[in-house]
Amino acid sequence: MPVYGAAGAAQWHRNLVRIALHTALQLETAVELWCAPDTRHPFFRSLHRQHRIPLRPQRQGDLGTRMIHALNHAQSRTPGPWLLIGTDCPALNPAHLQVAALQLARGADCVLQPASDGGFVLIGTNRPLPPQLLRGVDWSSGQEFKQSVQRIRGARLELALMETLWDVDHPQDVRRARQQKLLPPLNHAQRGVVSHRSYAGQRQIAAQSARHSPETAD
């Protein structure tokens, strides 16, 4: 925040949300955006109009509670493989989503993609999950991935793990993303209101992924 100011940090966040949506939408399957504290923010409404995606309000609770609720809500509407991704990992690309979908198609109950800071950037499931599955995870501690793996395996769910990616937590991560051309330059004219948290949830990509990118099966 001190490096870019509140408005600059908000603009970086908006850029990251757009990148996450672009990644999900490239697979040409249903995508929805889970928003906090609600769906009324003008930025979220503009994404709804532009991409014709549904907006869902995140429920109250810690990060684990909100993620499990989003996945289970999706499962209650359309059973099958669903992926949930954060909006702070510009290194995540459609090929990663295809691999995650294939893991679920092959029978995994859950799939996780770890982050280099100890968290994770993607979680997917083939089935409804216990609402309290991630209760007690120490979020933002650097132990989130390890603790989540322990809880998922402790629930006797088959878990598939993916390669580690890095996400954006600090100004040096923004610089890294810009150097790798994963983020556009900050447009000072577009600086605006402080942003809200959001997650892009993507569903049922397994069949399409296997059809479009068979080389990711290895």
Image (spheres, rainbow, N blue to C red):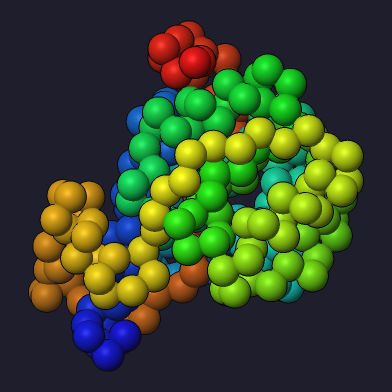
**Residue 115 % position (x, y):** 48, 54
Give the residue displayed 49% in from the left and 69% down from the top. 197
Residue 108 is left or right of residue 199, and the answer is right
Instruction: Indicate whether 111 appears above or below 138.
Output: above
Front-lying residue, 123 or 20: 123
Is 122 or 128 nearer to us in this picture?
122
> Residue 72 in the image: x percent, y percent?
77, 46
Q: Position of residue 117 (x, y in %)?
A: 47, 63
Residue at image position (67%, 57%) is 146
Image side of residue 8 versus residue 66, left or right: left
Q: Residue at x 79, y 70 (%)?
A: 136
| Residue 39 appearing in the image | no
- Left or right for 218, reference 14: right
Give the image location of residue 3, x and y in percent.
22, 85
Which quadrant would residue 172 be assigned to in this image?
bottom left
Q: Residue at x 14, y 56 (%)?
A: 179
Task: Work out which quarter of the rendered image holds the N terminus and state it.
Answer: bottom left
The answer to which of 74 and 53 lies nearer the viewer is 74
